[in-house]
Image (cartoon, helix red, strand yellow):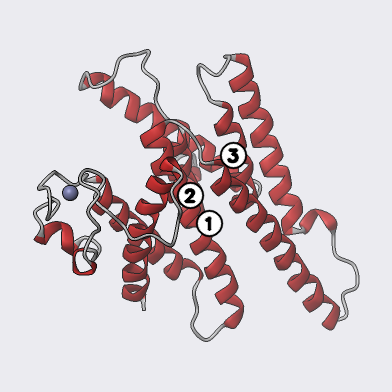
Amino acid sequence: MLIIFFIFGLIFGSFLNVLVYRLHTAEELFLSRSKCPHCQKPIRWYDNIPVISFVILKFRCRDCQKKISWQYPIVEIFTGLVFVLIGWKFFVLTDTASWASTAYYLFVASALVTILVYDFLYLEIPMIVLWTGIFASIAFGLYTDWMIISQGLTFGISKVEPLSMHIYSSVLAGFLAFVFFFALSAGSREKWMGMGDAYLVIFLGLILGWPEIFLALFLAFAIGALYGIIMLALKKKKMKSQVPFAPFLVLGTFSAIFFYEPIVSWYLGLFY
Ligand SMILES: [Zn+2]
């Protein structure tokens, strides 16, 4: 079953590469065929197979022989792996209720990968993707609560604690994360943190809820610091050069979605 998620992820990753490029150049998203960014020749359908085509073509365009960026296969494989983790964590073939959450997380993961790649390439967060994700997350949160409440009613429970509701935890997490990042951004006049990141963490808070968002942000800073140290050591970046932060936030979020319990119990195990 997971192999289907992987192949589906590869194909979707290939689409997300195109999406990132077309969001940036403001091209129409679906109608026109993919083309080589160098020579503009349309890509043949048999050269459009994720990962495999890159290997067969030896990472060069069939027409102009210019190098195709490593970004393409990396994003495809990464999306494939994320989709596998979603299948592993959320999908149960015989449980139709799990299909909705699987679909939601596949959608959210696609939005997060798009944001990661876009910010990495252009130091900017694609707002249209972000708002779509925020809207979907609120809708999914309300849907989840509604399912729980309606199930509770059939079991004769008429009162649901507002604080136990999914949407409450989500909005709280999004709001607190936003306040923290807004302060970082405004306080440093966007030198430490861009305003786009403050909007991004609203989305991440809505996905994760409280207290999972806390782990995601912690990991984002940890991964970011590690990346900074490595880049300084390799002399690839200077102390002052601008580094996109959304990729770290997205990686922290994926870690928290899939591995919250093992990470927390490992961390607590360090002290007891
Ligand atoms: Zn070409």
Label 2–label 1 contact, CB within 8 A: yes
Q: Quadrant of residue 224?
A: top left
Q: Residues within 10 Å of mark 1 (few under 14, many from 20)?
A: many
In the picture of the structure, the residue carrying the numbered disc 1 is 108
Q: Measuring 69% from the left and 30% from the top, which residue is drawn there?
A: 179
Which part of the image, by quadrant, shows the N terminus? Answer: bottom left
Considering depth in this image, is 260 or 15 the residue closer to the camera? 15
Q: Measuring 65% from the left and 22% from the top, which residue is drawn there?
A: 183
Rendered view: 97 above or below 176: below
Disc 3 beta carbon < 8 A from ligand 1?
Answer: no
Please state which amino acid type lies under the numbered disc 1.
Val
Q: Measuring 57% from the left and 39% from the top, which residue is drawn there?
A: 200
Dot label at residue 201: 3
Considering depth in this image, is 43 or 133 the residue closer to the camera? 43
Q: CA distance from mark 2 to mark 1?
A: 6 Å
Spot occupied by residue 62 in the image (x, y as percentages of width and height): 12, 55
In the picture of the structure, the residue carrying the numbered disc 2 is 112
Please state which amino acid type lies under the numbered disc 2.
Leu
Q: Secondary structure at mark 2?
A: helix
Rendered view: 232 above or below 109: above
Please state which amino acid type lies under the numbered disc 3.
Val
Q: Secondary structure at mark 1?
A: helix
Return the disc, 3 or 1, that comes first in the chain's sequence: 1
Considering depth in this image, is 113 or 35 the residue closer to the camera? 35
